[in-house]
Image (cartoon, rainbow, N blue to C red):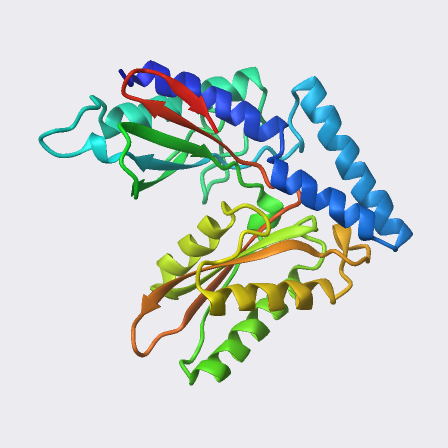
Amino acid sequence: MITKELIKDVTINILRRAETTLPKDVKEALVRAYECEENEIAKVQLKAMLENIKLAEKMQRPLCQDTGIPLFYVTLGLGLGGESRKVNVNLNDIESGIREGVKKATETIPLRPNVVNAITREGGEPNIGDRIPYINYKIADIDFDGLEIIAFPKGGGSENVSAFAMLSPKPEKESEKEIKKFILDAVLNAAGKPCPPTIIGVGIGGSADMAMSLAKAALLRPVHMRHKDARVARMEEELLETVNNTGIGPMGLGGKTTALDVHIETADTHITSLPVAINFQCWAARKASARLYSSGEVEYL
C-alpha cells in the first residue's frame, strides 16, 4: 500500500540521490566534453566539475552549495483512477508526504534553506512555503498500479536567465529562423551566469504558461535523446551546434562546449500566437526518480 509515510521516505531518498549523484547521461556528456576540449582553461573547469562529482558521490554531500528549489514531477498510474482503481492513495497524501520529505531532507542531507517569500524575502520553514515544494502532475501513458515521483531541484543561477517571448507567427522557415535567433540571443545574454556547460530546455507553442512548462519538462529528457518529430530533432541538433560555436564555454571562460544538449518540447497553439520559452539547466543537472507500486514496493529508477 502506498502511504504518506512511504512517500515521505521516498522523497528523502530521491532528493539525496539527486543532490549528490548526477545521472549517468550527464556525467558521460561532461566526460566527452573534457576529452574533446582543446582550450586549457576549459579543460581545467571541466576537470574540476568531474572531480567535484566524484567527491559528492563518495561523501554523499550536495554537488553544489545552491541545492535548488524543490520541484517534483508526479506521474499517476492508470490504476489510481476510476471505479476499478487498485491503489489506495490520494493527492493529499502525495502532497503532504512530499512536503514532509522535503522538510526532513533539508535537515538530514543537509540542504540550504532556499525558499523565501517572493515579496518580503523572508523565509519560514526551510524549503517549505506557499506552493513550495511545487508538484507537477500527469497521467501515465502506460498501465501500472502506482505512481512515479521525480525530484528535480532547480538552482537559482540557471533559473534566473530563463527567457520568454511571444513571437509573431510566420511561414514555417521564417518562424524557425526567428525561434533560433531568440534562443541564440538568450544564450549570449546568459553567457556564464547559468554555469555552463548547460542543458537548454525550449518550449514552443501552447499558451504562455504552457511554453515555460514545456521548456522545464524538456530538461528531464536524457542528454542526446532526440525529439520524436524529425523536424524538431533537426532543430535541436542545429541549435546545439550553433550554441557551442559561440565559444562561451565552461563557466563562461571560453571553450568548445557551452551546452551539453538542447531539448525542445512543443504543443499546438493559437492561430495568432507563437510563444517560445527557454529554461537553462546548469552542468549539475540534478534529478532522481522512483516508482511506488500498490504492493508498497519501491523501484529507484
In the rendered image, residue 80, in percent from the top left (x then y), is placed at 21, 30
Task: Locate residue 194 relative to residue 247 in the image: left or right.
Answer: left
Question: On the rendered image, what quadrant is the N terminus found in?
Answer: top left
Front position in the image: 272 or 30: 30
The answer to whether residue 131 is visible is no
Report which quarter residue 81 is drawn in.
top left
The foreground one among 47 and 160 is 47
In the image, farthest residue toward the right: 40
Q: Residue at x 37, y 58 (%)?
A: 209
Q: From the viewer's perspective, is 243 left or right of 97?
A: right
Q: Is residue 204 above or below residue 146?
A: below
Q: Residue lying farthest left?
A: 83
Residue at coordinates 48% horizontally, 58% vertically from top-left?
227
Q: Position of residue 8 (x, y in %)?
A: 39, 19
Counting from the top left corner in percent of width and height, residue 154 is at 54, 41
Side (left or right) of 86 relative to 296? left
The image quarter in which residue 214 lies? bottom left
| Nearest to the observer: residue 67 or residue 148 | 148
Q: Is residue 76 visible?
A: yes
* Residue at 49% from the left image edge and 34% from the top image edge: 115
Q: Residue at x 83, y 53 (%)?
A: 37
